[in-house]
Image (spheres, rainbow, N blue to C red):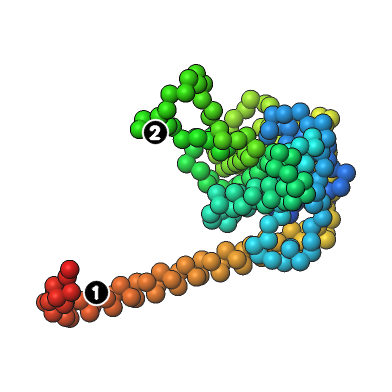
Amino acid sequence: MKNKEETNKVEILPLSNDYVFKRIFAKGGNERILKSLLEAILEIEIQKIEIKNPEIPKESLKEKLSILDIKAEINDNIMLDIEMQVGNTTAIDKRLVVYSSKLVAGDIKVSEKYPDAKNTIVICITTDNILKRNAYLSIAKLKFEKTQEKRYAEMGYEKEDEYLTDMISYYIIELTKFKENKPRTGDLLEKWLLVIGGDEEMMKKCKKEEGEIKEAIEQLEEMSADEKEREIYEMRERNRLVYNTEMYEARRKGLEEGEKIRRRTWRTKKIKGNSQKIVRKKYKY
């Protein structure tokens, strides 16, 4: 017979869901929780943090492709865009560049002077494998290519500039790679990624320790027990399922139509036989 605790146990919502992720990390008063995660990812000390968009517009929850990213500023000189990406990684590289461009453009508009533009960091945590790289955390910057020998000019620089600028950086974390390799250094980033990935053992361990991860887990449990929050989460998942189904059907119909065209073309060639060769020869140039 189940005891009362087992009967009342609520299934914990996945922190790897974009809505749940934003609710926990961008909620007003949760700056310390976001600060802890960012310090683990960026490996820097954060003295000050401000979440720019803690709210979640209701209309965005109904949109199948809406992005629930978190915009923040740290240490008064770095702008951040953090996204928990669940599926739909089409053209993710271009999307990340667009995110960074919008942050830079928005900051320039405010400061109105190029030298005053703040550094920009885009962080993407994804549940899919999207890069052909042997790393679960990849960092990209605007790096110079190797100088072509025919373009070389001897200027006496013993050490050449490696990057055009350190103003823009991209941090891409692929949770599937992390889980598959099961790294266990025990550092703060690994703890966060295990919790975000839903590792029950790590969640139990962190609940016994004081700190921001414990706070995040406790708020996640409260959110999971809230019927309205679960309803929003389930609606978000249904919308995603509908979108994925629509895309699957569109691809399937496209392939079927393509196969019909291929068969018609093949039959036409077979019927016409040598006449097609004559036509091709006539228009060859």
Residue 276: image x %, image y %? 16, 77
- Looking at the image, residue 99 lies above or below residue 227: above
Q: Nearer the viewer, residue 109 or 7?
A: 109
Q: Which mark is residue 151?
A: 2
Q: Quadrant of residue 33?
A: top right
Residue at (62%, 27%) from the top-left corner?
184
Please tell me whether mark 2 sits on a helix, a strand or a loop.
helix
Q: Nearer the viewer, residue 82 or 282?
A: 282
Residue 231: image x %, image y %? 78, 62
Q: Is residue 118 visible?
A: no
Quickly name the residue at label 1. 266
The type of residue carrying mark 1 is Trp
Viewer-side label of 1, 2: 2
The type of residue carrying mark 2 is Arg
Q: CA distance from mark 1 to mark 2?
A: 51 Å
Q: State left or right for residue 227 relative to residue 88.
A: right
Q: State left or right for residue 283 relative to residue 173.
A: left
Q: Quadrant of the C terminus?
A: bottom left
Q: Quadrant of residue 63?
A: bottom right
Residue at (53%, 45%) from the top-left corner?
129
Residue 29: image x %, image y %? 88, 44
